Amino acid sequence: MRFPLTPKTEHGRVLGYRATAKAPVAQVFVGGTTSDPPHSPKGPTPSQAKKLASKRSFLQKLGPGLVTGASDDDPSGIATYSQVGAQFGLGMLWTMLFSYPLMAAIQEICARIGRVTGSGIANNIRKHYPRPVLYGIVSLLCVANIFNLGADIGAMAAAAQLLLGGAVTFYVLFFGLLSLLSQAYIPYSSYVNYLKWMTTALFAYVATAFVVHVPWQDVIHATLLPSISLNSTYFTGLVAVLGTTISPYLFFWQASQEAEEVKVRPAEEPLKRAPWQAFEQLLRIKIDTYVGMGFSNVVAFFIILTTAVTLHVAGVRNVETSAQAAKALQPLAGHLAFVLFAAGIIGTGLLAVPVLAGSAAYGVAEAFQWRASLESKPNRAPKFYGVLAAATLIGLSLNFMGINPIRALFLAAVLNGLISAPLMVITMLLAANPKIMGRFTLSLPLKVAGWIATAVMLLVSLGFFVSQKG
């Protein structure tokens, strides 16, 4: 049976063709289960779908999830992980093992929302929730992202000064403008490949742990048998770590990037309109997300480990910046550890700043129904790029305003932890709604994992407030 085709266009340019008649749909790949999707006019048979998925190389299956996970280990995250490593020693290593399945589950759910609906988180909230809820979440996202941006650019500049000399002011301007111009003038389809390869900078932190002495037996014990302290300092650190690891900007970014992939690839459609693509795409999302979040948590684990066995052991309990952590390592762990740590700050910053600015821009643009695409030129999406530029420039300017970036950064991490819980509730409700997700609502295992992650963030936030009163 043949189906008529109509062109898929954007601003008069033909991107490809899609079938106008609906193919019969029986069962598709949903949640963690696999059932045979039907043959479609533009899609393969079930056996062909499996062969196509297997032919894609491992690296080709990695994209939004890998970039999202790697951007989580930004300079501000490095500062947070360094601080808890210096302050609590090995005492918070368990958080990386504990948070991994929760982080991966909620990120997979966000990615599914983007891929199934063809829209980001903010756009879906706009369609199904009151405006005050939408504007409140997006506003808090922007505030936290801008503080993170400022701290990340400042940390990159400080690390560059440590390695190369020169003025911090020059590096602040250089890194801020480099990030802004690259997002504005490099098409998304090319830019995302650069971001993917920039994730290799994070191996610097794994390598650093192997040039210092590590008591591996103690490390295994601390990782598998957590020691939890019921005081305000510990809970503040715990909220900061989980707020850095399970962070709202990651939700917005990965969902928007999955929606962007649909826009820039002519043969692809939102899964609600093209369920025959579900097997390959949902399998890709799962692999991409679990690898990306695993990469993120492994790197964070090694940052905590390195600072715990060097700074904490040496009696250095207070680390305010990632650059300070790098500098403190030099006399304790040697020049190589210092260079690796400092170079990693620059590499992760170059990866994270675009994600922070981009997630804010996607959130605002979707909230107000503006055109939002990194594939478009600035003159085709001026409001989107205006928000992106404003976020970057305001964040950059914080380094010249006399604002204490470290205090602001830590508060932003805590704010992320507190925002995450209500946003995760909304995200779970979106993903469970058949009107939004069609036949792609969550499977039971993914639903359980997502709600456990949400409950954990709610309990940690509650514990933080209770500890502050005590």
Image (cartoon, rainbow, N blue to C red):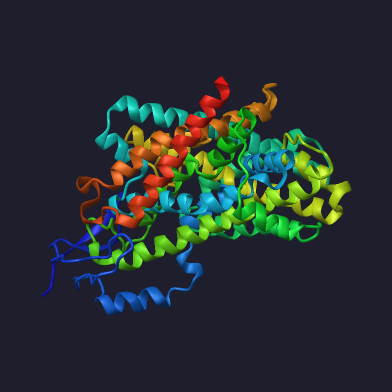
Q: Quadrant of residue 2?
A: bottom left
Which residue occupies the extreme right position in the image? Answer: 331
Position in image of residue 193 (x %, y %): 53, 59
Report the residue at 40% width, 31% height from top: 137
- Between 83 and 69, the residue placed more toward the observer is 83
Position in image of residue 152 (x %, y %): 64, 39
Using the rendered image of the protein, determine whether residue 294 is visible from the camera's viewpoint: yes
Report the residue at 50% width, 37% height from top: 388
Report the residue at 40% width, 46% height from top: 452
Which residue occupies the extreme left position in the image? Answer: 1
- Between 70 and 426, the residue placed more toward the observer is 426
- Between 314 and 333, the residue placed more toward the observer is 314
- Asked if 189 appears above or below 150 in the picture, the reply is below
Q: Quadrant of residue 125?
A: top left
Using the rendered image of the protein, determine whether residue 386 is visible from the camera's viewpoint: no
Position in image of residue 226 (x %, y %): 61, 48
For this view, does 75 lie left or right of residue 267? right
Position in image of residue 457 (x %, y %): 46, 38
Q: Quadrant of residue 217?
A: bottom right
Viewport quadrant of the C terminus? top right
Circle count: 0
For this view, does 373 lie left or right of residue 80? left
- Asked if 105 appears above or below 156 in the picture, the reply is below
For this view, does 86 lie left or right of residue 336? left
Report the residue at 48% width, 53% height from top: 187
Viewport quadrant of the N terminus? bottom left
